[in-house]
Structures are given as C-alpha cells and as structure tokens.
Amino acid sequence: MNAQSVTPSTVRREREKQERRAAILAAAEQVIIARGFAEASVDGIAREAGLAAGTVYLYFPNKEALLQELLGGKIRQLNEAVAAETGKPRAFAKALPAVVQAMFRHFEEQHGFFEIFARERIEFARAAPQSDVRFREMDAGAKHLTDWLAAAQRRGEVGRGRAAHLAVALRGLVFQFTRDWLRNGATGRLTQHTNFVADFFLKGAAA
C-alpha cells in the first residue's frame, strides 16, 4: 500500500478491523475462563463479542487459533513485565528477586486464563508452525533473559556457564512453581515464593 492509497476511510477500516479482532480475543478469554476450553465454542465466543460466528472465522480459523493468539499475548505481557525490571540500573542480586516477582505477579493476575491449562492439561501440537506468535514470544523472552544474564556475567555478578542455559533454568523454576500453584487451585500468593526461587537460583545455577 503506497502513501497515495492511504485514505481516511482506509485508516478507519483498518482501525475497525483491529478493534473487532481485539473484541473477539477479549470475548474468547471470557468464555474460555468461564466454561473451560473444551466447552467453549466459536458460536459462544461470537455471541459474547456481539458478532456473527462467520465474522469470527474471518479472523481466526478455529478456537485453537484463538487460544494460541491469547497465549501469545499473555507471554508478550510477561516479557514486558520482565523487561521493565531488567532495564533498571542496579546490581544483579537486587534485580533478580524483582524479575522473579514480576513473573509470579503476572501469573497471579492472569491466573484465570492459565488455570485452564493446568485443569485441562492443554497441549499444543508439536507440528505447530514456528511462526506461531507464542513461539516468537517465548523465543523473545528467552533471548532477553539470556542477554541480561550474559551482561551480569561480564560484570562478574553471575557464575560461569552458558547464559542460555541459565535462562532456561530460571524460567524453569518459575514455571514449575507456577504449574504447582495452579494445579493446587491457585490458593495463597504465588509471589510468596519469590525470595526462595531467587536465592535458589543465585546460589545454585548462577553461583
């Protein structure tokens, strides 16, 4: 599309498309949280969004695609929460608990959505395309943590070892605590484990 073809009506139509897509995703999240993924339907999501089912299919081929898009958005938000903490100038030992807490807080705030995965044990097909938004966001999050850990290693604040492996270890700790918390009904505060996870990582994998 060249500059001459961008008219006010074109801009308006594009904005309306983005708003409709956002409304479908918001409705899908509400329906999935309320009914579970297995019981959710495109028809029900369309009704929640105030749209015809055919309109939903113009944006998403099925409810699996909707769920994947929602998950990609949640991971993006997680990455942004982590980046907000790693971007602050402070010693690694001070930053690490803040990063872990930001991750735990994100899962607490979004527990209704993530509980569906724990309760229904949803698994995506291994053959899903690598261009999938959730893959891109997971990769972006891993790279950000890897770069952050590598910088701390260069400053002598983190022990030796491949920064990429340390990033996997850190995320693995957070994700495992989160899975256990969700499977136990999300009772109590997930953030109460912040200091334990940070200390365990700092004195273990990152020592």
Image: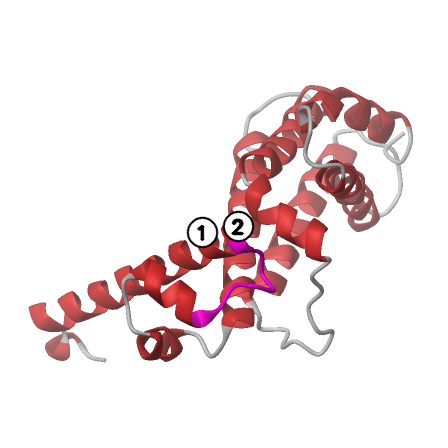
Mark 1 residue type: Gln
Can the viewer see residue 68? yes
Check contact, mark 1 vs mark 2: CB within 8 A.
Answer: yes
Label 1 vs label 2: CA separation? 5 Å
Q: Secondary structure at mark 1?
A: helix
Give the left or right position of residue 95, taking residue 56 as reference: right
Location of residue 129 in the rendering, given as x and y in whole percent from the top left corner: 63, 77
At a point 64% along the width and 25% down the height, the residue shown is 98
- What is the chief secondary structure element of the magenta stretch? loop
Front residue of this view, candidates 86 and 191? 191
Determine which quarter of the picture holds residue 187: top right
The mark found on residue 33 in the picture is 2
The mark found on residue 61 in the picture is none
Can the viewer see residue 7? no
Q: Bounds of the magenta span? A: 35-42
Location of residue 130 in the rendering, given as x and y in whole percent from the top left corner: 64, 73
Q: Is residue 24 above or below residue 90?
A: below
Location of residue 192 in the rendering, given as x and y in whole percent from the top left corner: 71, 21
